[in-house]
Amino acid sequence: MSQAVQLSSKERSLFQQVVKCYESKQYKKGIKSADQILRKTPNHGDTQAMKALLLNSIGSREEAFTLAKLALKNDMKSHVCWHVYGLLWRSVKNFEEGIKAYKFALKLQPESAQILRDLAMLQVQMRDYEGYVQSRKEMLRQRPNIRQNWTAMAIAHHLAGDLKAAEQVLKTYEDTLKTAPPRTDIEHSEAVLYKITIIAEMGDVSRALEELEKVKKTNLDKTAVMEMRAQYLLTLGRKEEAEKAYRALLDRNAEYRAYYDGLEQAMELDQNDKLARKELYASFAQTSERLDAARRIPLDFLDGDDFRETADHYLRRMLKKGVPSTFNNVKALYTDSAKQQVLRELVESYVSPQTNGNKNTNGDNADSDMFQESALYFLAQHYNYKLSRDLTKATTYIDQLIAAHPKTYDYVMTRARIAKHSGDVTEASKLMNQAREIDLKDRYINTKTAKYQLRANDNFAALNTMSLFTRNETLGGTLGDIVEMQALWYITEDGEAYARQRKYAPALKRFHSVLDIFDIWNEDQFDFHNFSLRKGQIRAYIEMVRWEDQLHSHPFYTRAAIEAIKIYLLLHDRPELAQRDYIPGADVMDEEQKKTAQKALKQERVKEAKQDEERREADKKVLAKKATANADGEVKKPDEDPRGYQLLDTKEPLTVAMRFLTPLVQCGEKNLEAQLVAVEVFLRREKYYLALKHLLVAFRLSSHSPAAHALAFRLLHSVKGSDDKTLKDLIQSSLPSPYNTTDSTSLPPLDSILESTSSTEANGTSSPSPAAVFAYVRAKAAIERSEQARAKDNTHLVIGLFEQEREDVSLEDAVQGVKVLEQIGADADTRTRLESAVLKRWAGAGSLLKRGSL
């Protein structure tokens, strides 16, 4: 290690200029200044470190790390070099190495507030709360006169679970104040409420209420104070005061259902005393003609004639106004079959010939027309809804409306939904596009059309539709802008559409884009660790941290991750799928069909090459404009693998699948499908203890899950020849019957998959559910595949579900049946037989069945 080089006064001035250039994001200017210094003192470690930081900011990451390591070699005892080294690791999301570098920098410069702050941010980002407490304690010791340090210290204790210490820190700071902060001090107002929430979390609600009473008149967040006070009074059993508090909240917002729930509890209304509850809501309904909640909530608890009368008034009021969302407001009641029948009878009576306009609308002809139109629309939605579905009637009602009002896009959209539920996704896509063309400026209909086009596997049309509302001149064109805007719904649907077509490369590309977006959301916390302290928004910050802890339980991540894992499982089982010249379904094609498919594949490759060339030219123009407009900063590079072929060409698909699986199972303790795909992955990786762990979670979530039973059988089959007695004993003591067999040489009959789930049938029969049949066939196929056998003799079980026309079999089951036959390698005749049975029952489902499947 060489001795640290000292700079002259002129070069020290230049070095300060380098630092300022970095802080003001003038990176290229900063690099020029750093080069001036290094020409005279080439081994100056601090300058090399700062240049490395500047290079990293313009995207030269490898060069930056090389220079940073050289800087450390030249000056190992420089806190600047170690600090920069930590910043570089942070930029590549290697937070563990970043923390190590920061800690080494602190040993050299213990009083550096900047290094301490960066270390604290990384520690809270990594949820190292013990380390975060120590860092914040040191920052508070150095600068106790800054309120942010006290608040941050309290937050550190709170996140670490030491609520008493968190409260004591806030109280200590308040005691040091010689004069009370002004009433307009938002930071103080928020800190006081934060302290009160901590006291309440400790269980001392009485003291929390006392503290709240002291500040209720002066605190700036009036709504929060009123809500907290009402909740605390209710918790303490001070019902009369709680009632007044909730009535005051309802005076502010009479549409918020939680306030009504709190009021009912405060008034100690018996849930069975429906008359008293009805009178309560009627008293609120009388206060405003526009109030909806007080009129809608009683429908949840009333029944019999009271329900019919109240529902009649509610429906007439809404339909007379022509509120399009009337059905959506009441469809939650459809879980009660009696209420569903009453609603249907009421609305059908409105449109019957015996019902005249005078009865409904007091003789106003315009209102009468509106009322009849709204009632017909309600019935169309009623018969299209899954719990009351009769698509023939739904079509009759909606066609009647479209004939009378062809330019009302709501009706055309509903017609598209009816087509979708009938299985004709192609026709549904066309109808939704017709609705879009009625109002070309409506972004909602535009996105809805794109979604339907994706459901019909028309990715190209969907992208063109989205291009009407995107910045198409951005890098990557329309799709690049969609990814940049983080439109998760489109990216996920796009990936699923490609997966159904067995175009696994672009499907993986989309799912990896979703993974990257969630990584960005996780990294975005950095911006708020200090920002929330500066702005004093502490309670919102705590909520954000807790939300981030469950980030990967987000529905869109769950969907994308599970689909991506399924593709990687396929790639592991069938490596030939990764070949670019692979033709989906070639195993069931004759020679003529294969030639046609190969020709189509070549034409598609030519089309892709042309599109890629056009994209490259467009990207060059975008980059040229950006270079002219902004010469500084990291330049975003064009995607080198826009179609995802590099992702498809992986040699270790299960290793890549773990990138999706690890965060999925960490946040997916209550997600059955997440646990099931985890078992699939670990079975293939021969990690049987982990497979057993997730299988037991799956059984806890659903003891009758056919897929869980099938995986239990496969686990037993996988370890049958194992010498690991501990594993076998653990399986025996953990799994439910019949899989906890004491005979390690024999297995329970595979039919137990069907038997263990047949008791769950809603129709009371002993027939296994469709899900049980699919799980059985898949399990047998997987086991026989491992024994170099074929499982085609089980296809009759799948086809039988539809040829028998069982009532418990749905159109969704038909789609799953097609997937199962494909997965087990059924021949073309068998698949045709299944499709014929399905089309006999659902005539419009042809396009749905031919969309392709995983």
Image (tube, helix red, strand yellow):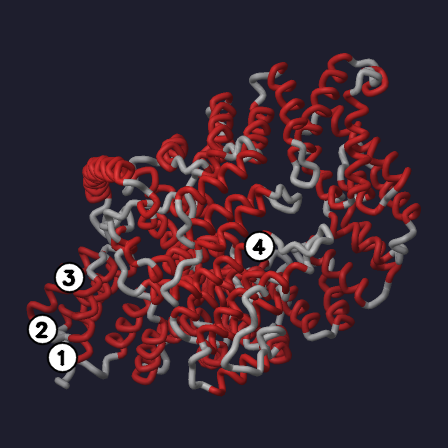
Q: Earlier in the sequence, mark 1 or mark 4?
A: 1
The residue where tag 2 is placed is 41
Q: Indicate the amino acid at tag 1.
A: Val
Residue 824 percent location from the top left of the image? 42, 54
**Of 453 and 202, the residue lying toward us:** 453
Residue 187 is at least partly visible in this image: no
Which residue bears the numbered disc 4?
771
Give residue 237's quadrant in the image. bottom right
Residue type marked 4: Ala
Q: Would residue 109 appear left or right of 234 to someone viewing this image?
A: left
Q: Which disc number belongs to residue 5?
A: 1
Residue type of the residue flagged with mark 3: Ser
Q: Which mark is residue 33?
A: 3
Mark 2, other Cα within 10 Å: few <14 / some 14–19 / many ≥20: some
Where is residue 241? Give x, y as percent. 85, 59
> Which residue does the image show at 48% across and 40% down from the upper left?
833
Q: Which quadrant holds residue 718?
A: bottom left
